[in-house]
Image (spheres, rainbow, N blue to C red):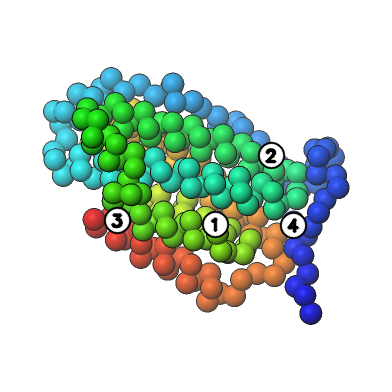
Amino acid sequence: MSTPIEPILKENPNRFVLFPIQHDDIWNFYKKSEASFWTAEEIDLHQDLSDWENKLNDNERHFIKHVLAFFAASDGIVNENLADNMVTDVQYTEAKFFYGFQIMMENIHSETYSLLIDAYIKENDEKDYLFNAIEHMPCVAKKADWALRWIDNGSFAERLIAFAAVEGIFFSGSFCSIFWLKKRGLMPGLSVSNELISRDEALHTEFAILIYSYIKEKLDKNTVHAIISEAVDIEKEFIIE
């Protein structure tokens, strides 16, 4: 017997028209996201350049480079999942609105991280190395490969959990490291961008959990635990590296 189609994935002939709102909780997430809009031009990096050269040590610069290199690539991977899978698969109009806005915000995140690398790193060869971290850094490649695997092979429910892990686990350690710099009064531009982006990613993670609550045929607990545990192990390896 074939598995019934999830209601959220079942073709919806009314998906082209927004009103009347059918799913208030999903719509509220869209409005929250809309209210949190910002742009890369809001980030002031003048003090950062002095801190980068004069107040960070080599180990701190090394770690921040790895963090920014991962972030610069990761938002593109998230967007590939959104554009290739979520926007087309999900039939609830309110969710399509959220995913459309999320794609735009991930673009702004990507632009911001690229601007940060471009501002902090002076040597073109090193910039190229960081912008292409998936090819050059095994610890970044491992995280990227894990996420891409779920884009290509996961079921809808598995992708929801996996990308909740990407945005809720893969990003967390890196966010914390930048908050540590803020606590020391360093890199204010990076710190502001981190506050804005971490807020966005927390909302995206919560939204993935909300959409998962609409799934009728939930994954078994062992599958969920396996996905989350693997993500945690990969993130621990990245932080140690």
Residue visible at 48% across and 43% down?
76
- Decide if residue 166 is on the left or right side of residue 152: left
Q: Quarter of the image containing the C terminus?
A: bottom left
Residue 99 spot, x, y in % from top left: 63, 43
Foreground tag (2 vs 1)? 1
Total residue callouts: 4
- In the image, which disc is placed on residue 97? 2
The residue carrying pointer 2 sits among few (fewer than 14), some (14 to 19) or many (20 or more) residues within 10 Å by Cα, namely: some
Q: How far apart, in angstroms, are the residues tagged by discs 3 and 1?
A: 20 Å
Instruction: Give the residue at mark 3.
Output: 138
Residue 149 spot, x, y in % from top left: 49, 61
Residue 215 spot, x, y in % from top left: 69, 63
The residue carrying pointer 4 sits among few (fewer than 14), some (14 to 19) or many (20 or more) residues within 10 Å by Cα, namely: some
- In the image, which disc is placed on residue 151? 1
Asked whether disc 3 touches disc 1, contact meaning CB atoms under 8 Å apart, the reply is no
- Decide if residue 32 is on the left or right side of residue 45: right
Instruction: Give the residue at mark 4.
Output: 9
